[in-house]
Amino acid sequence: MKKFLFLLALLFVTYSNAQILDPVKWTTSVEKISETQYKLVANASIDAGWHLYSQNVPEGGPIATSFIFDDNNGAITLVGNTTEEKGYTINDPVFDMVITFFEDNAVFQQIINVKDKTNTVNGFVEFMVCDDTRCLPPKEVALTFNLSNDKVTTAVTNTDDVSSTNTEAPQVNSTVNEGTESSKRGLITLFFLAFLSGFAALLTPCVFPMIPLTVSFFTKQSDNKAKGIRNAIFYGVCIVVIYVLLGVAVSAIFGPAAMNALASNVWFNVIFFLILIIFALSFLGAFEITLPQSWANKVDAQSNRSGLVGIFFMALALAIVSFSCTGPIVGTILVEAASGGDKVGPVIGMLGFSLAIALPFALFAAFPGWMNSLPKSGGWLNTVKVVLGFLELALAFKFLSTADLVLQLHIFEREIFIAIWIAVFGTLALYLFGKIQLPHDSPLTHISVGRLGLGLIVLAFTVYLIPGLWGAPLKLISGFPPPLNYSESPYGVGYTKLGSGGISTHEALPEDAHYGVHDIVMFHDYDKGLAYAKKVGKPAIIDFTGWSCVNCRKMEEYVWSDPKVLDVIKNEYVMISLYVDEKRAPTESEQGISEYLYPGKPFKKIGDKWAELQIMRYKSNAQPLYVLIDHNEANLNAPVAYTPNVDEYFNWLKDGVKKFKKQ
């Protein structure tokens, strides 16, 4: 059934790419405020499944919606900025930043002052629209506002003769549905990670010894076993309530807007980095983070009260006394949850953490015989703290990396991040093997089997990271280090490309070609690429793409990289990659007259030329689009869009070769 639905969805995507897509319709209206002041209203009607981006998008994200208004030679002045509705705000999984967008409908308003008598205000809106499989190139739509009527008037914009421009437009694959599902998956993942962190906190010197002491207290002080179990369960519930209230407090203090801003805010990421470094040093034994002793004394005095109130204060006393061990873990969960941009993240994180803490107390109270199987307290508890310290140290650099990515400083690039993780986990492996000792460690006479096994796992992970310095993708930790293209060299440390004095197995490049991703010989000019295909007697692949098209990059990284696909592309085709968002102005030889985008006028950018080619010839304006053609420019088979299935894409390529050879 799943396979059938996948094929059905793929068929729909392929069919929809054979059409000119225009999913946003604009209408305008005017509200008269006074004799000299009006409110201009632009309404975007968005087709189902598509979404439009906000005017405020972080740097490095997709193109924002923007408005330009004609001042009618000084007769019109703008009052403030163009306002917009609330929209949907998510932590975009592709760009790893908080982005706001609209679905179904979006309303933008601009107040103006009119000095001289005028009947109309002209302007235009530039915007970008996406669905769950593709994004359309940025488009400009002319807007006309009629001021001649005191009442609200509506003018439907004629979009048939409006040009489409291709500026610096990242192509993204981020939708309402995807964002919602991603948010749900993120919260579920956060819950389980917090739950596991709670179990890790149980194994620290501050918490583990409290389990038998607390359970024994309930069973001995209660009149009967049933009452003891009820008291212990209530004790566990109180622990959950205390930590969840902490999560609620964090959400309330920051507020939803601040939560959504954390993921891409440079200063918050730097502060989170410093906080986690402090937590890590605390776990490693440099110092202890504790709450004031007076707090513990006051709460402990209240715990002597009888009844449920006393039990609640016992739970609060546990939280305060064990803070030196649980505090860094709780802080890390709250930092990670808050940086996810979801306002309920801290609450979910604390719920998972507290459940793991509370569960053993309830279970051991119900089955006190189980306590005989608990291991005795000892130096192994401090080992758990140290391991957690190393993990926090590694996690801290994720936030520093995010700050560097947002600023595009290229200081903390991929190789540096991986090198630091190699150092951190390599040192952790040495610690687990007993080669390094820290301040609070007990003398180590031998290594337990469990510690040895964990050390081998950490050592294997460290070795796994090393090839990342030479460009290995490291899919196991995808999302933590900077992306592959954010590096000192996209080919990794120590690799030298042709022309830089190193040794290369590359053959001489054809004229006007260059080596692209996976060293595929590529042409960026349609005519020159086709001419070379005729010269060597091979069919051509036209790759309509964009510089920041996410699905294009996914195809290149996960489909084109497959050995059998790469072999066919390199040896049986000539690749012509046409970037529809290329902003470079055409040279004299590349220039032409537009028929669709700028009728009768020269192309403004070279990307416009390729966008018009895609629209006019293939009736599509979404990327990626792949077309296999022969020397007469006829299609060898049906073009395809985003096709993540390697076998399907491979069969499509081989089908084109087979049909070409039959000619």
Image (cartoon, rainbow, N blue to C red):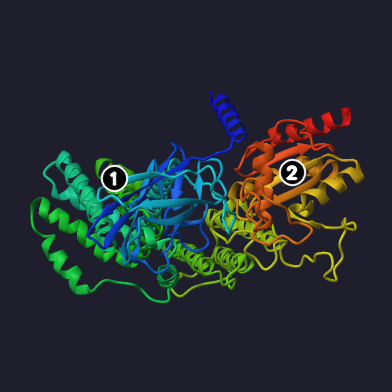
Q: Compared to 262, does 355 lie above or below? A: above
Q: Which mark is residue 542?
A: 2
Q: CA distance from mark 2 to mark 1?
A: 66 Å
Q: Which residue is mark 1?
A: 364
**SS at mark 1 in the image:** helix
As drawn, is 449 to the left or to the right of 31? Answer: right
The quadrant of the picture occupied by the C terminus is top right
| Nearer-the-camera pick, 275 or 309 | 275
- Residue at 57% from the left image edge and 30% from the top image edge: 12
Q: Which mark is residue 515?
A: none
Task: Tell me if residue 6 can be seen.
Answer: yes
Where does the image place residue 436, in percent across and percent down from the top left? 56, 71
- Image quadrant in which you'd find residue 309: bottom left
Where does the image place residue 570, in percent across and percent down from the top left? 82, 46
As drawn, is 229 to the left or to the right of 170? Answer: left
**SS at mark 2 in the image:** strand
Total numbered badges shown on the rendered structure: 2
Where does the image place residue 479, in percent across and percent down from the top left? 54, 55
- Image quadrant in which you'd find residue 336: bottom left
Q: Amino acid at mark 2?
A: Ile
Task: Tell me if residue 93 can be seen.
Answer: no
| Nearer-the-camera pick, 499 or 529 | 529
- Residue at 37% from the left image edge and 52% from the top image edge: 145
- Residue at 72% from the left image edge and 67% from the top image edge: 493
Determine whether label 2 and label 1 are within 8 Å by CB: no
Q: Amino acid at mark 1?
A: Phe
For the residue carrying disc 1, how many other residues have a C-alpha within 10 Å: few (<14), some (14-19), or many (20+)? Answer: some
Upstream in sequence: badge 2 or badge 1 = 1
Where does the image place residue 19, in percent across and percent down from the top left? 59, 34
- Image quadrant in which you'd find residue 47: top left
